[in-house]
Image (cartoon, grey):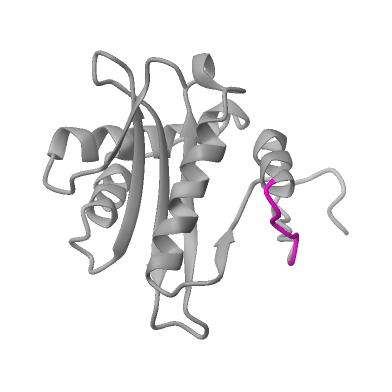
């Protein structure tokens, strides 16, 4: 993590909020070339990031010497749901900074943030196509507890007649 500086996202820093929203929405393009997102989605994500929707967020950032965001980790507290927990909403590291413990360090800070709030369960969803994240989570002690499945309906070769 040489040359990088950690800071938390200031929800009033609109340029940073917009950049994290863009990075969050664009991240799936790395493993899903058909992924797309809209301006409306960017605005919705920005609203969640700055807490204007009432969410309680931890957004840790790693920035380079030019103060460009090169990694982020977004955790959202869910204290009023079935069991108080937090949801890991997003994690992204610029390719030049991967394999340098940036993601693990950010995840540790997010876990510490949760523990300081009495939250003892952190949940996440990961696309199976994002094997790098699946492997990182398994190394860090996450367990697979559910597998989501999707079937696209419509004109397909294997559709029953």
Along the line of sight, the residue nearer the viewer: 125 or 62: 62
Decide whether residue 97 is among the magenta residues.
Answer: no
Q: Position of residue 59 (x, y in %)?
A: 34, 47
Q: Which residue is painted at 57% across and 31% down in the image?
A: 34
Q: Residue at x 44, y 52 (%)?
A: 110
Magenta stretch, main secondary structure, is loop
Q: Residue 7: which quarter of the image?
A: top left
Tell whether position 144 is magenta.
yes
Q: Residue 11 location in percent, x, y?
A: 18, 49
- Left/right of residue 133 with respect to residue 115 in the rendered view: right
Q: Nearer the viewer, residue 22 or 94?
A: 94
> In the image, is residue 134 above or below residue 32?
below
Residue 107 rendering spot, x and y as whole percentages: 51, 46
Query: Dividing the picture into quarters, in which one does residue 79 lie?
Result: bottom left
- Give the extent of the magenta segment: 140-145
* Residue under the image location 23 percent in, 65 percent down: 53
Q: Residue at x 47, y 22 (%)?
A: 1
């Amino acid at each position: 993590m040489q040359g990088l500086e950690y800071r938390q996202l200031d929800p009033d820093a609109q340029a940073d909020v917009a950049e994290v929203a863009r990075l969050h929405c664009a991240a799936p393009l790395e493993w899903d070339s058909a992924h797309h997102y809209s301006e409306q989605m960017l605005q919705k994500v920005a609203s969640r990031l700055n807490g204007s929707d009432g969410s309680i967020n931890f957004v840790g950032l790693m920035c380079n010497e030019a103060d460009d965001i090169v990694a982020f980790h977004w955790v959202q507290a869910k204290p009023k749901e079935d069991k108080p927990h937090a949801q890991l909403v997003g994690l992204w590291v610029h390719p030049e900074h991967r394999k340098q413990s940036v993601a693990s360090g950010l995840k540790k800070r997010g876990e510490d943030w949760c523990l300081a709030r009495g939250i003892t369960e952190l949940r996440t969803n990961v696309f199976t196509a994002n094997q790098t994240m699946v492997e990182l989570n398994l190394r860090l002690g996450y367990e697979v507890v559910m597998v989501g499945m999707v079937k696209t309906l419509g004109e397909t070769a294997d559709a029953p007649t």
